[in-house]
Amino acid sequence: MRQGGRVARVNAATGASAAGRGLRPAGGPGPGGDFSRRPEPILTQTAAAPPAIELVGIDKSFGQVHANRDINLAVAAGSIHGIIGENGAGKSTLMSILYGFYQADRGDILIGGQKTVIRDSAAAIAAGIGMVHQHFMLVENFTVLENVMLGAEGGATLARGTAAAREELKRIEREYGLDVDPDAVIEELPVGRQQRVEILKALFRGAEILILDEPTGVLTPAEADHLFRILKVLKEQGKTVILITHKLREIMAITDTVSVMRRGELVATRRTAETTVEELAELMVGRRVLLRVDKGPAAPREVRLGVENLTVRDGRGVTMVDDVSFAVRAGEIVGIAGVAGNGQSELLEAIAGIRRPASGTITLGGKSVGGLDPAALRRRGLAHVPEDRHHMGLVLPFEENENAILGYHGAPEYCRGPFLSLDAMRRDAKAKIEKYDIRPPNCRLRTANFSGGNQQKIVLAREIERDPDVLIIGQPTRGVDIGAIEFIHRRIVEMRDAGKAILLVSVELDEIRALADRILVMFAGRVVGEERPDCGEQTLGMMMAGVSGGQGASA
């Protein structure tokens, strides 16, 4: 295997189940296509067969930001190839070039050994490439079938095209185990099934190469396991999968080969079976990384956050939080574990003043704060890192320095009389960028142009640097790389040790068990038990499924 400015070639028979398989000819159903025709038989692949994808000398800059530097990469046909790297390492930019969203400044793309010009996503689809984005590209009030057909309607007579598309969709579902109701409306589907729709869209258009960008960032552990089963089936059928992720356990579990990017460069390619989590982490960050949370025992003091008999209903009147009571003390981290959709989000929103409870009491420092809005709660010492940074944590068209003070923009240090001081805002933003290693280090850049992990750092810096008495935090490391995870975990523990009260919600059981001093488990809107962080994962899993209870929730 050759690296360092040369093409890192991987043998075509990377995985046992992929051996002897190859690419089908690019193409498939498109506008006016024959949806009922089964795919062409898979061609026999020899050891000398070209890679499914070969990137040669790919270079891309955005102004002064050098996102990709002379990237040379080969991906074997019929394999699962992981690409990892810190946030801002250039992974998504590289895949966006392959999918036609960006044009490389220099370099070539070869598909099946043939030089291919990919000017847009339509050209990528025609070349047999499909992409499932980190944030899904679905029309929420359309059905599954309508989303799958969008842009590939099958001719002027929509009814005829719909019937043919429905049959093709059924075939794809059966072949790859993608069980989704074609008449279901997207906004009514859980996140895991929405992701399956994105995969169906790609396969419907004839994708032989499938790119998945941080596919488990919004999935529960059970949904992630199901996704991996689907990916194995795709590989067995001869598809080539490129998996972009920051989760090293997933890389070790599912990939055949892994490439590491750092600061825009490809620094290594390894066979997954021949590397370790520790080696990959060091290659990603450029230094040794602590893969466990280093913290001593908690020293809890007075109650800072109290929740008593809290009931919260959603916009349809459905009870999402059902008579929940607990307390969080100064100097401790209380974790809430549970499968997504069991009331954790509504609980955080009620505490943050975003959602009005139907009944119950919320106290800060022993004083009721019922009815206060988020701005008033911030003045009382409550900070909130929302689970969904795009919809609730950031205004993506704003510059980084504007988002860095969002919600605190009335504070005197950011104002000059009745007006905001741009100089003060930018000084503050630059200090946070340096402290939290936000990349690129440009406070004038639109927030939409930062990677997901760096967007998360912007939110965390904004909330943590206000030195709140109580921090409620949802999914703190969603979409964040391993080096940043280490930093974020350390900051959370430092806040605990400084006497702050922290309520943490995460779908990552490892994260909950590593950070929390006490774990509350929610199921169907209720706290069904409390456990110590050293309890077994199986115990928590059973409680999360509503099968058994723990010690009982206590203050």
Image: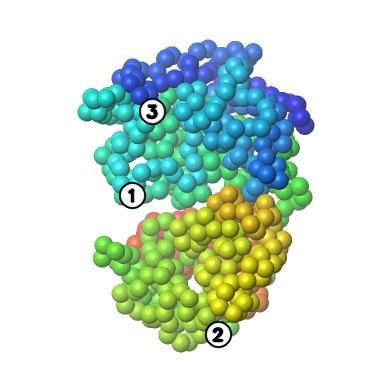
Q: Is residue 548 left or right of residue 68?
A: left
Of the numbered discs 3 and 1, the one sitting upstream in the chain is: 1
Q: Quadrant of residue 463?
A: bottom right
Q: What residue does disc 2 label?
A: 302
Q: Badge 2 local density, few (<14 within 10 Å), some, or many (20+)? A: some
Instruction: Name, please, the residue furthest toward the left.
Output: 159
Q: Amino acid at mark 3?
A: Phe
Q: Quadrant of residue 40?
A: top left
Q: What residue does disc 3 label?
A: 204
Q: Is residue 93 above or below residue 480?
A: above
Question: Residue, x 32% and y 39% (percent of image)?
Answer: 144
- The quarter of the image holding the N terminus is top right
Q: Secondary structure at mark 2?
A: loop
Q: What residue does disc 1 label?
A: 187
* Residue 474 point in image, percent of width and height: 50, 63
Q: Nearer the viewer, mark 1 or mark 2?
A: 1
* Residue 374 point in image, percent of width and height: 46, 74
